Amino acid sequence: MVARTSEGRAFRILPILDEFTRECLAMLVSRRITSQDVIDQLFRLFVLRSIPEHIRSDNGPDFTAREIRRWLARIGVRTLFIERGSPWENG
């Protein structure tokens, strides 16, 4: 998700929700979010809450990045993507 400050400067927000409980597990806010930032955040959550069977995300660059998909596949986490044009699937 991208938002702007009152001065017009863009920043990114990466909310991570538990699909079942709808609990917000983490929220990363930064001017720039790299693949490594996403991997680091997920790693912390996996250590605290265990490795999930799958992760559902939109088709944005945060979760479609090759490095992230490779890392998730290496640890056995499937990726599910929300259908384009289906905003009702997005938490």
Image (tube, rainbow, N blue to C red):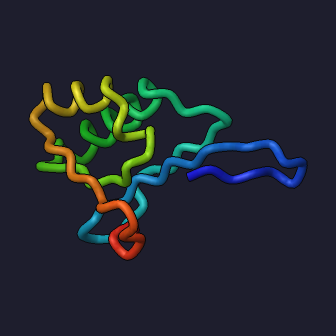
| Residue 9 position in % (x across, y down) | 80, 42
| Residue 38 position in % (x across, y down) | 42, 34
Who's the residue at 43% across and 39% down the image? 62
Side of 19 relative to 34 (left or right): left
Q: Is residue 57 above or below residue 36?
A: below
Who's the residue at 25% across and 40% down the image? 46
Q: Give 70 or 17, whichever is nearer the viewer.
A: 70
| Residue 31 position in % (x across, y down) | 67, 35
Q: Residue most toward the bottom?
A: 88
Who's the residue at 33% across and 53% down the image? 57
Who's the residue at 27% across and 53% down the image? 81
Side of 67 relative to 9 (left or right): left
Q: Is residue 37 above or below residue 21?
A: above
Q: Quadrant of the C terminus?
A: bottom left
| Residue 32 position in % (x across, y down) | 61, 32
Q: Is residue 83 above or below residue 88?
A: above
Q: Residue most toward the front?
A: 85
Total labels: the figure holds 0
Side of 78 relative to 6 (left or right): left
Q: Is residue 44 above or below residue 25?
A: above
Q: Residue most toward the right?
A: 7
